[in-house]
């Protein structure tokens, strides 16, 4: 898997990445759609999402970070923090 | 031509050969998983579950039986597989395939159902051309742990894991760093049960070790990494290890009798009841299989026994 430089956090790419891991179409991953309740993600897929995010974005996710992986918007915010890209 | 060796005895019944269906090409098959499947004896005693890799084998055999177009195709990769619920003795499986073309081959997108719903999905990539790709040489594994001071043999392996003959597919653990990585080996023999009694003129293709069992063997090495610190020899008394998903498992080179396969597994992340692994398998310094990602779950036996009761009542 290729990783992306820290300068480029693209929400659409993040959407596609997550959709692939949780086995749904990217269009189904709405910004606020909850992975577990709305998209049927189980604990195993959630763990895989964490693994893929770590590899692709070269970040380290702590156990405490995982409870922020509830929907795309929250993942995006978390990754932006991890990559040190605050609001412009 | 005699078919290649397979861990699944059930015959594939073609329900619909590959044919246009709207703008798509689809096909369909059916299997009856009889209680005398070889794998049930050892997977597991007292709790027979059809191995997840055997569900993939059903998708693979369906592909070979209904492949559109001509020409020999080989399984190049399991792009993805997701396992939703176990398959039990007596289940009837239907396999629905959507075909799409790929450079030099086909992609098979298979949905596998039993009488109660979807059990798994698998996307398999096929390529035409030679059985082996140009050899991939393994770089020294950055994660190679120190060699175990004593070899871990099948008796010890069976004190850690519930897998039994003929589904115990790891012969030795040669190195381990608990909670992190493991190296285990499986020697392939002409007298392996999976070959049955091969004809004297069996081709290399017929003697290739079944691809899905190579995956299963690697998975068992991963399982040993998990059970090292919490032995789980009896699923009825402990936990049931279930396959969750396979992502991008690529097959570079067939494995033949006489080969000693070395599995290298690294634990990427673990939670209480779930874990994710990566790794590869080699023969000598030639890579035969690469594993991008595998997930496994531990479930309480009561939940699986409840599903089995529903299955046998049906």
Image (tube, rainbow, N blue to C red):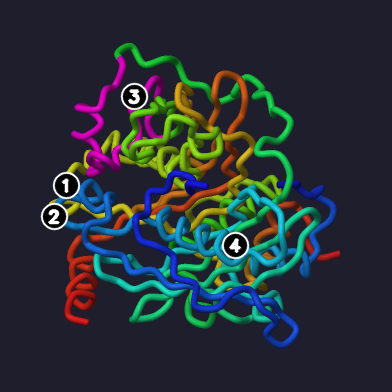
Mark closest to the chain's N terminus, 2 or 1: 2
Which residue position holds label 4?
A: B123
Query: Label 1 neighbourhood size at 10 Å, few (<14), some (14-19), many (20+)?
Result: many
Mark closest to the chain's N terminus, 1 or 3: 3
Location of residue B179 in the rendering, given as x and y in whole percent from the top left corner: 39, 35
For the residues labelled 4 and 1, the Cα–Cα distance comes to: 32 Å
Location of residue B16 in the rendering, given as x and y in whole percent from the top left corner: 55, 78
Question: Residue B172 has which mark?
Answer: 3
For the residues labelled 4 and 2, the Cα–Cα distance comes to: 31 Å
Query: Label 2 neighbourhood size at 10 Å, few (<14), some (14-19), many (20+)?
Result: few
Which residue position holds label 2?
A: B46
Look at discs 3 and 4 and give the one toward the viewer: 4
Question: Residue B105 has which mark?
Answer: none
Query: Label 3 neighbourhood size at 10 Å, few (<14), some (14-19), many (20+)?
Result: many
Asked if B181 appears above or below B5 in the picture, the reply is above
Same chain letter for marks 4 and 1: yes
């Amino acid at each position: 898997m290729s990783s992306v430089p820290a300068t480029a956090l693209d929400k659409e790419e993040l959407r596609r990445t997550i959709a692939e891991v949780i086995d749904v179409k990217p269009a189904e991953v709405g910004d606020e759609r909850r992975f577990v309740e709305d998209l049927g993600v189980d604990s195993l897929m959630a763990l895989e999402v964490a693994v893929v995010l770590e590899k692709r974005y070269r970040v380290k996710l702590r156990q405490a970070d995982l409870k922020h992986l509830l929907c795309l918007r929250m993942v995006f915010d978390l990754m932006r923090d991890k990559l040190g890209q605050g609001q412009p | 031509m005699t078919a290649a060796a397979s861990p699944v005895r059930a015959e594939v019944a073609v329900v619909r050969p590959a044919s246009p269906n709207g703008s798509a090409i689809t096909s369909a098959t059916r299997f009856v998983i009889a209680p005398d499947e070889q794998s049930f004896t050892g997977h597991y005693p007292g709790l027979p579950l059809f191995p997840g890799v055997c569900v993939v084998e059903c998708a693979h055999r369906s592909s070979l039986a209904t492949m559109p177009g001509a020409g020999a195709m080989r399984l190049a990769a399991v792009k993805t597989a997701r396992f939703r619920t176990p398959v039990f003795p007596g289940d009837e499986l239907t396999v629905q395939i959507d075909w799409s073309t790929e450079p030099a081959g086909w992609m098979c997108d298979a949905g596998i159902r039993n009488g109660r719903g979807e059990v798994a999905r698998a996307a398999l990539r096929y390529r035409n051309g030679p059985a082996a790709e140009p050899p991939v040489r393994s770089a020294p594994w950055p994660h190679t742990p120190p060699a175990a001071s004593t070899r871990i043999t099948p008796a010890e392996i069976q004190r850690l894991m519930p897998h039994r003959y003929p589904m115990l597919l790891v012969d030795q653990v040669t190195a381990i760093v608990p909670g992190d990585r493991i190296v285990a080996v499986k020697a392939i023999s002409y007298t392996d049960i999976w070959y049955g009694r091969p004809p004297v003129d069996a081709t290399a293709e017929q003697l290739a070790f079944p691809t899905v069992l190579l995956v299963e063997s690697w998975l068992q090495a991963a399982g040993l990494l998990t059970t090292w610190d919490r032995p789980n020899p009896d699923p009825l008394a402990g936990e049931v290890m279930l396959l969750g998903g396979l992502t991008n498992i690529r097959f570079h080179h067939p494995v033949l009798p006489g080969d000693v396969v070395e599995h290298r597994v690294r634990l990427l992340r673990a939670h209480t009841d779930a874990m994710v692994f990566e790794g590869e398998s080699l023969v000598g310094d030639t890579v035969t299989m690469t594993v991008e990602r595998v997930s496994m779950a531990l479930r309480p036996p009561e939940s699986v026994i409840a599903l089995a009761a529903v299955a046998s009542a049906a």
